[in-house]
Amino acid sequence: RRGARTVLHGGLLQHLASPEHGRAVAAFWRKNRADPKLKADYLLSAAVYRRFQESLCEALDAYEEKEDTAIQEAAAHIRDMEQKRREMVQAILEPQRVDVLGDGTTAVYTFTGNLSDSPFAMEEQEQPGPSWSATFLREEPICASNTMPELHYPETGQALTFIGHQETGGEGNIHTGAKPPWLMNEEKEGERQIGPSYEEFLKEKQKQKLKQLPPNRVGANFDHSSQTGD
């Protein structure tokens, strides 16, 4: 790991070149009597690891230089776009503004300052002094009749009489004069009943109890509404 850069499998290569790994490999070979010719395949010499470090430093330097170049190009692009945006805003604020004064003189105002001296910035900063120059030109005032069509209204006509707001007796909505729901008087709880009465509940409970009895019991089919003789 170098700064904010991490080398893939760099820790493994560092462990293979460490003395601890060499002693562990030698002990494993003695204990298991492995082929000595294969022992070199599991070790990394110090010279090879040193060459790896040198090539790694060169690769990291080249990568960081490439990243710095990309960052500088991106920053230059951002500065260029910001400059174009400022030029566009200044070009919008530069057109002349023509006003007609009371004595018939036409005043042409041309914005000549920077963006910080614009009328929009003056409102926030409240800097004293004008931020634009005024050039007065002697010419005829612009007649309003030349730019706007003349409107003709009828001189006489039937007058309208206001008869007041018409109430609909609580119908409609609040925009038509009706009373809103949250101001209406609610019915008393005692005047309306929700669900069956207590007597009906007892009758239904008795019916459910009779249904649980055997259907062939004595008196199950007796008609209680029939009349019997004396």
Image (cartoon, helix red, strand yellow):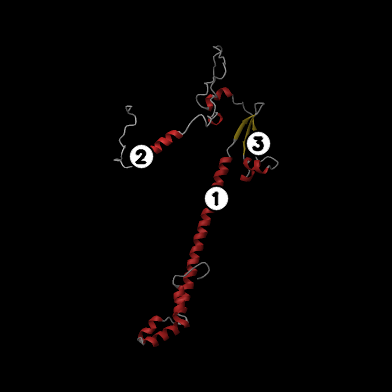
- Give the left or right position of residue 211, taking residue 138 as reference: left
Instruction: Return the residue found at the far right.
Output: 128
Mark 2 crowd level (few <14, some 14–19, many ≥20, 10 Å Cα): few
Tell me the tag on residue 134: 3
Which label's residue is closer to the chain start, 1 or 2?
Answer: 1
Comparing labels 2 and 3, the label whose residue is closer to the camera: 2
Residue identified by numbered label 2 = 210
Tell me if I can see residue 146 in this picture.
Answer: yes
Whether residue 33 is situated above or below residue 14 in the rendered picture: below
Tell me the tag on residue 82: 1
Whether residue 209 is situated above or below residue 164 in the rendered picture: below
Give the residue type that dot 2 points to.
Leu
- Give the left or right position of residue 54, taking residue 206 as reference: right
Towards the viewer: 26 or 147: 26
Mark 3 crowd level (few <14, some 14–19, many ≥20, 10 Å Cα): few
Tell me where residue 27 appears, x and y as whole percent. Answer: 42, 86
**Under tag 3, what secondary structure?**
strand
Give the residue type that dot 1 points to.
Glu
Asked whether the beta carbons under mark 1 and mark 3 sit within 8 Å of each other, the answer is no
Give the residue type that dot 3 points to.
Ala
Which label's residue is closer to the chain start, 2 or 3?
Answer: 3
